Image (cartoon, rainbow, N blue to C red):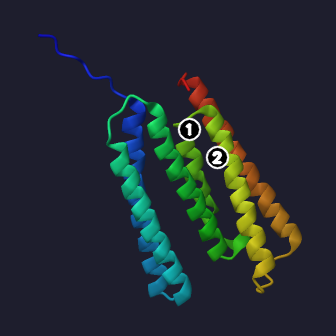
Amino acid sequence: MKIKKQKFSHLRSRTIRVARAHFLYVLIFAITIMLYDSWRLIAYEQTLQRWTLVVVMMFISTAAWYASRYQTQNDKYYKVILMVLIVLDIFVASYTVYLERGMASSSVILYSVPIIISALISRAAIFATAGFCLAAYSLALFKYFYLEPAGEGIRVQLYGSLFLYGSSFFILAAILYIVRTRDKIVD
């Protein structure tokens, strides 16, 4: 009697690990909200909006983790799961930037998470994700700048921030592209 060896998908194990890492991301996000709220650094309405975001993140992260445990030889299945997490992370970063006063926000670093995750999908996905991050960041920036009456900053700061951070997204993408090419990871 022959024992059949089951093929192992490296993308499956990486997708499971990324989904698990999102639980840590959600935990850190929740702890940050508790700290900001306990020190009254954010308004009650923003606290509620952020907790709603935590619940959405937890729900989608749990669904992604559960779905990634399914064994299939089709890597497209795992790529879709990773894309869902990327879209979630771009949304979280953009919404957080908007809530933290647009160009005054320190949450721009959150855009690095989806760009790094996209390196698991393909080299082209890295630059596509950087482009999506730039589009979402510019929307959050302009929406806050023009809709909120706070009057923080001037247009040159707005465009300067957009150029600096948008360029940084593509620099990170280029570095990940180089790393991915050097290791000869096949798309």
Foreground residue, 121 or 169? 121
**Residue located at (51% from left, 37% from top):** 120
Visible residue check, residue 92:
yes
Residue 136 location, quadrant: bottom right
Reading the image, the residue beneath label 1 is 119
Residue 99 in the figure: left or right of residue 162? left
**Residue located at (50% from left, 82% from top):** 47
Residue 185 in the figure: left or right of residue 25? right
Q: CA distance from mark 1 to mark 2?
A: 9 Å
Residue 63 in the image: above or below residue 142 = above
Please state the horizontal and vertical placement of residue 21, each as a whole percent of the image: 40, 52
Label 1 residue SS = loop
**Residue located at (46% from left, 76% from top):** 51
Residue 84 in the image: above or below residue 153 = above
Reading the image, the residue beneath label 2 is 129
Please state the horizontal and vertical placement of residue 141, each as a whole percent of the image: 74, 68
Q: Give the class, few, some or many, for how many residues have Cα within 10 Å of label 2's Cα (few <14, many ≥20).
A: many
